[in-house]
Amino acid sequence: MSPSSDTSGSPRPDAAGWEPRDPTLPRPPAPDHPTRPVPPARRGPARRLFTLLLKLFLIGVLLLAGALAAGYLLIDIPPANATARAQANVYLYRDGTPLARGGQVNRENVRLDRIPLPVRHAVLAAEDRDFHTSRAVDPKAMLRAAWHTLTGKGRQSGSTITQQYVKNYYLGQEQTLTRKAREFFIAIKLERAATKEEILQGYLNTSYFGRNAYGLQAAARAYYGKDVERLGTAEGAYLAALLKAPSAYDVTTRPENRATAVARWHYVLDGMVKEGWLTRAERTAARFPDPLPASPAGGLSGLSGQRGYLVKAVEQYLTGQGVLDREALDTGGYRITTTLDRAKQDALVRAVEDRVIDRLDPENNPADRYVRVGAAAVEPAGGHVLALYGGVDYTRQYVNNATRRDYQVGSTFKPFVLTAAVQHGARTQYGEPITPHTLYDGTNRRPVEGWNGGPYDPANEDDASYGEIPVGTATDLSVNAVYAQMAVDVGPARVRHTAVALGLPGSTPDLTASPSIALGPATASVLDMARAYATLAAHGKRGPYRLVAAVTKDGEAVALPRGDLRQVVGREAADTTTAVLRSVVESGTGTAARAAGRPAAGKTGTAEDDKAAWFAGYTPELATVVALMGQDPATGRQEPLYGALGLPRVNGGGPPAEIWARFTRDALAGTAPKEFDLRLMPGVEPLPDAPPAPEAQDGWGTPGEGRTIEAGAAAEPGTGAGPVAEAGAAAAAGPPGAAADPVTPPGDGVTDGEDLAAGEGVAVGPPPAGTARPGQ
């Protein structure tokens, strides 16, 4: 019997309390506690990965959106970088032809309307054909470029023109994720802040084209030697092709890449046809425009040869006249048209090279190592500087010999004493009016009279004595004893005042009001002296000298000093001085200048110890001053010029006068010789015409050069050693006592208090023939 049955055979509950359910009875109530749920089936690994990726994607989207929002809010458009703002200053000759470019960056910004439309289309065809219709950034292009880079299919920028402009103008060229991120956000903001035209203009002005050319204008000059507005379609397409690889696609410096460069050029033109910017016929007619050969290192951007001297002189003019300050010049972007005449500039360089530079032999003649040359030419009618010679090469000799103020001008100062004498109606110590015929004592080391300072007894050149000698002849022969006494008779302060009125700066070193002023211890520059002599050539009229004709920046004109010619000394004073200086050229120490082949006036000069030799002269159309200076290249010390150029002594009537003659002849070639129209002081009669000028000579010697004056020799009183002047028509002299031109005091800050018009119109005449007075 089983344990679950009793003895009667009926079923009974087991230990768990179970007993069979009677199906006729209702179902018992559910228990108070819930039953345990059946666990779900376990998920597979693929489903778990999908879920994870989905979550990561959602998180990434949220993070990217946050990053984009943060980047847009936090990254502002920054100021332009210094390199992008920097431009070259462009220097031009008076006719608009290029002279030089200055500045560390060769760039000249231009307005978009100066760039021909086909050239703009060429750039768009090369870089961003949808520029005008697309957004500032192109994510698809960026992703495509990244894919090409990662898969080895070549690097692509993936940047729109807007992004490239942001990189060029606001950021830099470094290849970093940070820079790319900033570029992205700045481009988006820039699109809202600037028009498409402004962005394109900025891009064309900041892109690099090779040959150290930044911007399309600089590229047009570097590759085709022309301004951007003169570019043709084919030329513009080649410049656009360069943007992809500026150095590699320069077919003159990398001829091995010519096929690739030409293929890129075709790509640009084909793109223009596709976009409707170029007709098929124009495309077929296009020929590859070979660029100019690359310039030697520096090109116009360099300062070799005369360019450095000219640029520095122009910069000194602009800053000295208060037109621009140094900071503005350094920033650049100025287009500066000078008054320099290209043909005359070239003629001056040729004259110096022919008469001096090519004859130097420093290896065999040590004295030739010391030779320096400075020259300047000024147009009397307007005060325009037409040519400058600063030295053999700015990269070898930095000091500009045309503008330096450290060499004595010597006897080239003497004409200012005569001008002052006539201007002020001065008289000798014995009451005789000073005219070209007035007799003075030319004895060597004769002490001056009437001077309250210390004793002064200057020596004549070579210690020569001349006895009685007229002022005109004393000028021809540059007699120091006569002019020192004349300076005292006129008044040294008046002499100084007149020199400043004629054009010497009031701050000229050693321009001291003493008897020695007549002998030229002042250290005015060659350009200063050219200005003063130009005033004599202009009959005593002078205005502000001009080295710059126009300055513009971004198409806007910059104001320049204004001022017309004004009468700073009387015409009779200036013209009488010119008459005397005519005689210097015809029969005095300046006869080498006759090789110019036209009427000329001038004066020679020699510095103390022969450390400089000068010739200052002019025709009615052109005033030019030339100086040879001695300087040790190692120490910078001034040195005598004895033995230089194989000459025992270099004086103003030698190489300086020969340079002057050669330059004047070439500079005025093709123009008819012009006579001086002189109005002389009353009592000074016009004399016969001077003899014709000799033919130009190739050697150093010229008629009258090296003339020896015997001690004690005297010229015939009242006549001089040659014609005093060629005055033209006698009517030009005017009647004695005629009203003089009004005179304007100089505006150079000099406060001598002298009236420049004093003595004007006083009738004076020559002393009686044969009279001489001791101490005269």
Image (tube, rainbow, N blue to C red):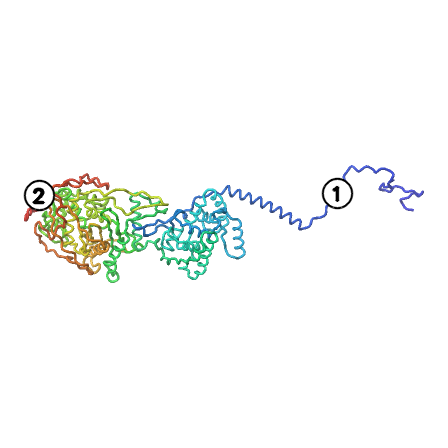
Crowd tier of the residue under label 2, counting other residues whose Cα lies within 10 Å: few below 14, some 14–19, many 20 or above: few
Please tell me which residue is depicted at 26% across the width and 42% down the height of the picture: 563
* Residue at 12% from the left image edge and 41% from the top image edge: 737
Q: Secondary structure at mark 2?
A: loop
Precedes in sequence: disc 2 or disc 1: 1
Q: Which residue position is annotated with label 2? A: 430
> Label 2 sits on what residue type?
Tyr
In contact (CB < 8 Å): disc 2 and disc 1: no
69 lies left or right of 602: right
Locate residue 671 relative to residue 470 in the image: left or right: right
Residue positioned most to the right: 8
Q: Nearer the viewer, residue 100 or 664?
A: 664
Q: Which x, y percent locates residue 647?
A: 19, 59
Residue 335 in percent (x, y) is at 34, 48
Is 494 displayed left or right of 344 in the figure? left
Instruction: Return the mark for residue 66.
Output: none
**Residue 93 locus on image (x, y percent):** 30, 51
Q: Secondary structure at mark 1?
A: loop
Where 122 falls versus 4 (above or below)? below
Out of 730 and 502, give the one closest to the viewer: 730
Q: How many marks?
A: 2
Regarding residue 39, the answer to whether it shows in the image is yes
Q: What is the x, y in percent for residue 708?
A: 12, 57
The answer to whether 708 is drawn above or below residue 454 in the figure is: below
- Give 532 or 344, whichever is nearer the viewer: 344
Looking at the image, the residue that sits furthest to the left is: 770
Which residue, given by chain and number where applicable, does mark 1 sit on? 37
Q: Is residue 106 visible?
A: no
The residues tagged by marks 2 and 1 sit, at their Cα atoms, a distance apart of 144 Å
- Local packing at callout 1 (Cα closer than 10 Å; few below 14, some 14-19, many 20+) is few
Q: Amino acid at mark 1?
A: Pro
